[in-house]
């Protein structure tokens, strides 16, 4: 009987060792799975951070080469642009509640009824993902802003987008009213394509010259200049010929 009891204890001990070994293996497997999950989470988090930072970093390096260039040295020569055109303007001080439907006959608009508040001066560059409504931007034009509009084909060109960002950087700040400028997209959802196969447009709401600033709406015109590609040289001339002071409300920011 003693021998049998000893044999039973041996069997139990062996079984216990097997159970403990299986438990140890299970814990090790769970530990490895936990470590793998943590590693995956860390990788995903790092990937998200890198992805979020990558765009701004690329934009910075692409525009940095233009930092020491004058406005007129960015992009194509002024010859890529047509001569400015004008038409009588309406809509001065005609405000509509934000979100109200507004139909603008021109592509893009240079004047017209508009929303109550303009876009703040601090922001100079927009993409299709965050651009203010047209009714807001038209109010900016009433305050003397010149707007560079770019179409979908330009939005797909990294070179031209870098040039537009660099141009927008030249107008940074909120204290110099000569820097009333915005670069914004014109998408297929906004209206028809620019005329003559052009891809860039400059717009301004003019009172017909600074000498007519107090003449009311009688001499007000919308001004357009269309270009086949980005031209800082053409924009400089446009903004010299149509400064912020040549607008219905030049002191509005």
Image: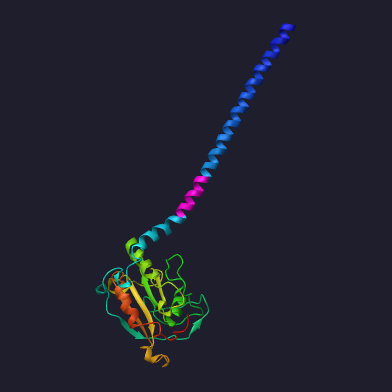
- In depth, the one of 176 and 27 nearer the eye is 176
Residue at x-position 52% and y-position 42%: 39
Q: Is residue 3 above or below residue 50?
A: above
- In depth, the one of 39 and 66 nearer the eye is 66
Image x and y of residue 99, in percent: 51, 75
Please say whether residue 219 is visible from this viewpoint: no
Of all residues shown, which one is farthest toward the right? 1
Look at the image and give the residue range highlighted in magenta: 42-51
Image x and y of residue 222, in percent: 37, 83
Residue at x-position 43% and y-position 59%: 56
The answer to if 45 sits in the magenta stretch is yes
Colour setup of the view: rainbow
Image x and y of residue 63, in percent: 36, 63
Of all residues shown, which one is farthest toward the left? 79
Q: What is the quadrant of the N terminus in the image?
A: top right
Give the side of residue 188 with respect to residue 94, left or right: left
Please say whether residue 41 is visible from this viewpoint: yes
* Numbered circles on residues, count: 0
Q: Splitting the image into 4 quarters, where does residue 80 fall?
A: bottom left
Identify the main secondary structure in magenta: helix
Q: Splitting the image into 4 quarters, where does residue 156 fall?
A: bottom left
Give the side of residue 32 with respect to residue 123, left or right: right
The answer to if 153 sits in the magenta stretch is no
């Amino acid at each position: 009987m003693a021998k049998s009891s000893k044999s039973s204890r041996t069997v139990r001990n062996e079984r216990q060792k097997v159970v403990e070994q299986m438990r140890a293996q299970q814990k090790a497997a769970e530990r490895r799975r936990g470590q793998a999950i943590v590693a995956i989470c860390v990788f995903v988090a790092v990937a998200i951070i890198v992805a979020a930072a990558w765009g701004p970093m690329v934009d910075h390096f692409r525009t940095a080469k233009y930092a020491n260039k004058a406005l007129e040295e960015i992009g194509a020569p002024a010859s890529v642009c047509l001569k400015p055109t004008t038409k009588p303007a309406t809509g001065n001080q005609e405000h509509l509640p934000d979100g109200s439907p507004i139909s603008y006959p021109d592509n893009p608009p240079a004047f017209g009824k508009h929303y109550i508040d303009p876009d703040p001066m601090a922001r100079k560059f927009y993409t299709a993902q965050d651009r203010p409504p047209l009714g807001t931007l038209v109010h900016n034009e009433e305050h003397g802003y010149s707007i560079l509009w770019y179409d979908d084909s330009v939005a797909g060109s990294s070179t031209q987008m870098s040039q537009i960002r660099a141009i927008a950087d030249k107008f940074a700040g909120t204290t110099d009213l000569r820097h009333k400028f915005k670069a914004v997209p014109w998408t297929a959802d906004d209206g028809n394509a620019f005329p003559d196969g052009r891809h860039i447009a400059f717009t301004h709401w003019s009172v017909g010259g600074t000498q007519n600033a107090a003449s009311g709406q009688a001499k007000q015109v919308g001004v357009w200049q269309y270009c086949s590609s980005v031209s800082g040289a053409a924009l400089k001339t446009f903004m010299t010929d149509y400064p912020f002071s040549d607008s219905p409300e030049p002191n509005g920011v």
